[in-house]
Image (cartoon, helix red, strand yellow):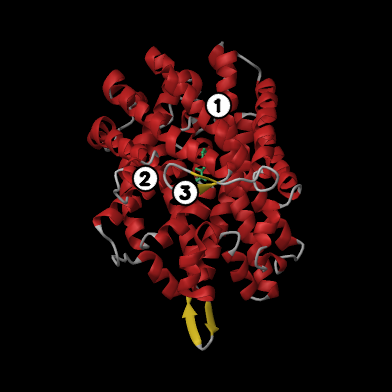
Amino acid sequence: MEEKKRGAFSGSIGFILAAAGSAVGLGNMWRFPYLAARNGGGLFLVIYIILALTFGFTMLTTEIAIGRKTKQSPLTAFSQLSKKFKFAGVFACIVPFIILPYYCAIGGWVIKYFVDFIIGNGEAATADGYFGGFITSQWAPIIYMLIFFVLTAFAVFKGVEGGIEKLSKILMPALIVIVICVSIFSLTLKHTDAGVTRTGLEGLKIYVLPSFEGVTVGKFFSILMDAMGQLFFSLSVAMGVMIAYGSYVKDEDNLGKSVNQIEIFDTGVAFFAGVMIIPAIFTFLGREGLESSGPGLMFVALPKVFQAMGPVVGRIVGIVFFAMVLFAALTSSVSIMEAVVASFNDQFHWERKKSCIIESICCLVIAIVVCLGYNVFMFEITLPNGAAAQILDILDYLSNNLLMPIVAIAECILIGWVCGPKTIEDEICKGGNKFGRKGLYNVMVKFIAPILLFVLLLRAVGIFNLLGINL
Ligand code: PHE
């Protein structure tokens, strides 16, 4: 009975596109390129790819397999494997609950820029202080956040196959086409500024060739930790999403193969996001443009680049670019909301509609507070890791830096030491499928992943700063 009522993806393709849709999001489009630019280009890429193939693969496999094995969402899945790990389920459900409101706030910013380029307001968007003026205004961020939220909630409300899968099947292929076209375009760019001509291909070199300039052991370690934190967020692991999606996968589907494809998708799009953005910024704004943009890369530096392409080309590229980011963000926010809704469904046996309404109310209240965090609730505190923060950053810190490593450590201990990696192996091998990289998986889940995660957690709570170690 229970199983019949549970939603399901129609097949492997639906699942892979939905999971890739979850993984490919603002993290890939916005955070990855600026982290790469800041951390020595190719060096960051190499570290990231190695981590994705080892650590990312381990976490993704674990979660999807836990989901399919238990047929439960995060809140209830862990306790089915071991009563003592119920707390991990609670944490894994709190993470998406915290992330959704601020993800929707940022999704609203994307819609704002998308609309700006459509109505021909792209030039105004390049003015100094435009972005700051927008996020500190009282109503506009809330209205755009609401639009983004309604789109998200609608897909979740329509259910697994009729909403989430359908949306991903339309948006993900469109996204790939746009990513490829914009990447090629970016590489063909050429611009002369104050007598200096720069090209997209030179920008590509900065992005992919490893730079060891100024790389000390401490810096290397800090790049490693940055890459690992990014990998978590990017693969949507340690926040219950992949457990929820895994629970909708049919028993006969090949999990190992799906995990590989999701990873390739996510890492590929992150890589190409860099190919789209870094050469374009380098060509038009030079090396300083790259070094100074940081998190403002997407909303501050890129509009300037689009403007420099001329009114018509810039407008078209701006529309296409922000449409692509919007697609990526939407399929991710849908998955974040689904993790919470599915948890409510499983824990309280509510109907999807009721869970959606209750989660919508909670999310909207917090999201409005987040939007007002740059206006009436404006304040700034310093986080334990030394960063200055407003409400959005505090939620990001709580979820990403604290709760996610805790959930991930709990998962590794549960699988590595309590249930044993064989639990996951059996799930992957169901129906005669093969588990490639099994040896690697065992070592990672038992030893390497929990140790790396623990160091990541220590760094987040500022232990290294306290000890005067600059990592
Ligand atoms: N993985 C998504 C991204 O890269 C973000 C995300 C976070 C999705 C949490 C689901 C859950 O932007």
Mark 2, ligand 1, within 8 Å: the answer is: no
Cβ–Cβ under 8 Å for marks 1 and 3: no
Mark 3 crowd level (few <14, some 14–19, many ≥20, 10 Å Cα): few
Q: CA distance from mark 1 to mark 3?
A: 41 Å
The mark that comes first in sequence, 1 or 3, is 1
Residue that numbered label 3 is attached to: 387
Q: Mark yes or no: residue 83 visible.
A: yes
The residue at which mark 1 appears reads as 8
- Which kind of residue does numbered mark 1 sit on? Ala
The x, y position of residue 285, in whole percent, is 53, 74
Position in image of residue 55 (x %, y %): 32, 40
Choose between 63 and 469: the one closer to the eye. 469
Q: Nearer the viewer, mark 2 or mark 1?
A: 2
- Residue 228, label in figure: 2
Mark 1 lies within 8 Å of ligand 1 (Cβ measured): no
Q: CA distance from mark 2 to mark 1?
A: 31 Å
Label 2: state its secondary structure.
Answer: helix
Residue that appears at 68% across and 62% down:
130
Secondary structure of the residue carrying tag 3 is loop
Kindly identify the amino acid type of the residue bearing the numbered disc 3.
Ala
Q: Which residue does the image show at 35% across and 62% down from the upper left? A: 40
Left or right relative to 458: residue 289: right
Up the image or down, 325 lies above or below 249; here it is: below
In the rendered structure, which amino acid carries the disc numbered 2?
Met
- Front residue (pair 213, 208): 213
